Image: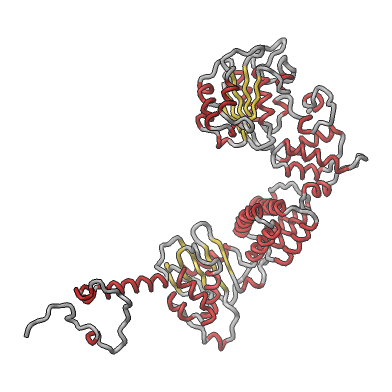
Amino acid sequence: MDYKASMADSSPPRAYQVLARKYRPRTFADMIGQDVMITTLTNAFKAGRVAHAFMLTGVRGVGKTTAARLLARALNYETDTVDAPHIDLSAPGRHCERIMISSHMDVMEMDAASRTGVDNMRELLDGVRYAPSEARFKVYIIDEVHMLSTGAFNALLKTLEEPPDHAKFIFATTESRKVPITVLSRCQRFDLRRVNPTRLKEHISGICDEENVKISDGGLALISRAAEGSVRDALSLLDQAIVQGGLDGSEVTEEQIRDMLGLADRTRVLDLFAHAALGDGPGALAEIRSQYDDGADPLVIMRDLLDVCHEVSRAQVLGDKASFEAASDQIDRMMGLAEQITPAQMDRIWKMLLMSYEDVRHAPVPLAAVEMALLALANAGHMPPPELVAKLISEIETGNFTPPESLDTPPNSSPSAHRSVQASAQHAHTTQAITPPVTAPEAVSKMRTIAGLEEFVEALPRDKAALKYEVEKHIRLIRFKQGLITIENLTDAPPTLVGRMVEALSDLTGQLWLIDQESGPGEPSLSEQRRIAREKQDAEDRSHPAFSHPLLQGAELIDIRDIKPGYAADNIIPANFGQPCKDD
């Protein structure tokens, strides 16, 4: 692309002009990544089917305002040889320059963010009924249209429904969901897409050549990724990156760009991910502290960890067919992680990172939130993969399971995996299990069987009083088998309850136990059962004739007590109490 001919401003700037303005597209061909919109407009203009209202949506910096001005130019395009709406704007028309600098009297621009009221809209629309003074159409460009008030939208609606033939409306917004459907339905909508990093990198590389500056290939890749699809953001970052090289014309390195963006080295991010995913909590904490001290932003680190998780998952699925924008040693590292971690573990890591990302965003101390997230990942890394636990559940339910002396764990699991297993199954339930400790032969004979939830509670030792209370209060039993307990999904229970239960069951029986959660419904908890029994007994007691005797009307019931064993009830209340006396 010839940037001098097609993109640079025609008049020399009096002062430095930022790249985002200097290289603003001058034609539709200069817009990158918006081929769908350009193709649709080209066909519509050729067929003479030009809409009266357009809605341009998309994230910041993808070219909505620029596209609106280009569309206004196209609608009013006029040269010595062309006198009709035209998409090819390579040759400047009579009205083009004034439209692009927002000084044409027939093209009105309004920023709805600062002029939201109905009076502003009425003022803008007052001249709609008058024909354009010199151009073909009167064009109304309203930026950030979602900021208009309800009254302003209502004032616009009637004109938008039946506009004069000489009026065209172009709206731009980042929040199309906030625009009333009555307005959206009257517009031809174009969703401007984010520009992919590869295309964005090519774009800013061409600008670097035009500006005669040198930035390393890796540095350009970092800028294109950090821009998140926004061309304006990419050019703003490029502006900032150019001055990192000083005045001697030396190349701006990838390390300098990393420091500017507050990014951690990709290799160090892989190290951090490996520490956390493979269960090395101390190593993960040491690495995150080191990166933080070197200037890395906690939120950016979390985003980088999500990127690594995504790339490793792609490597698992695609294998050698996967393509990555990374150095060969980093690709080898990701392939190695893909072999060490199972797909279900990667799914668990992804979900944990995604939840933690939001926590870090809102945490008062982001670094602390990142460290807690890494510790949670490291704890999960100690556990066998969910696939293994799902297999154990299936074997127990079909009666094919024999408790092993030890539970095999994958290469990435730490020794503590032989004491604790926690697995997350898809959607329906969560399963937790624990492998029994190695016990001496004489101790095995002392182990007992547990036949029910109440028996388990009664068997708990005195130092497990808190666990006993929580089990009685929160556990609603669905099924109880030797080695497998199925309960209703826990809602307000402590998050450690299931793990403590399986550990206690293992200590009591010396066997592997699994606790499976389902949607229910389960039986009432033990506490609820006792309450129901008390209420039932109380109702039976109150049905005794003594409570309806006229002599007790208005009396206050103080207490109802159980009769001591061996003491006849008739000694306290005669059986004929409350019945009429018979005369001798």
Total of numbered circles in the picture?
Answer: 0
Q: Is residue 354 above or below residue 566?
A: above
Residue extending farthest to the top is 80
State whether residue 371 appears in this view. yes
Location of residue 173 in the rendering, given as x and y in whole percent from the top left corner: 61, 33
Which residue shows up at 59% across the image and 79% down it?
437
Q: Quadrant of the C terminus?
A: bottom left
Q: Nearer the viewer, residue 435 or 322?
A: 435
Location of residue 524 in the rendering, given as x and y in whole percent from the top left corner: 40, 68
Q: Nearer the viewer, residue 234 or 380?
A: 234
Left/right of residue 274 with respect to residue 151 in the rendered view: right
Residue extending farthest to the right is 248
Colour scheme used in the picture? Answer: secondary structure
Left/right of residue 28 with respect to residue 518 in the rendered view: right
Q: Quadrant of residue 168?
A: top right
Q: Quadrant of the N terminus?
A: top right
Which residue shows up at 62% across the image and 17% down it?
138
Q: Is residue 543 above or below residue 63?
A: below
State whether residue 36 appears in this view. no
Left/right of residue 453 with respect to residue 262 in the rendered view: left
Location of residue 259 in the rendering, given as x and y in whole percent from the top left corner: 81, 49
Residue extending farthest to the left is 584
Q: Is residue 36 above or below residue 138?
A: below
Location of residue 383 in the rendering, given as x and y in whole percent from the top left corner: 62, 67
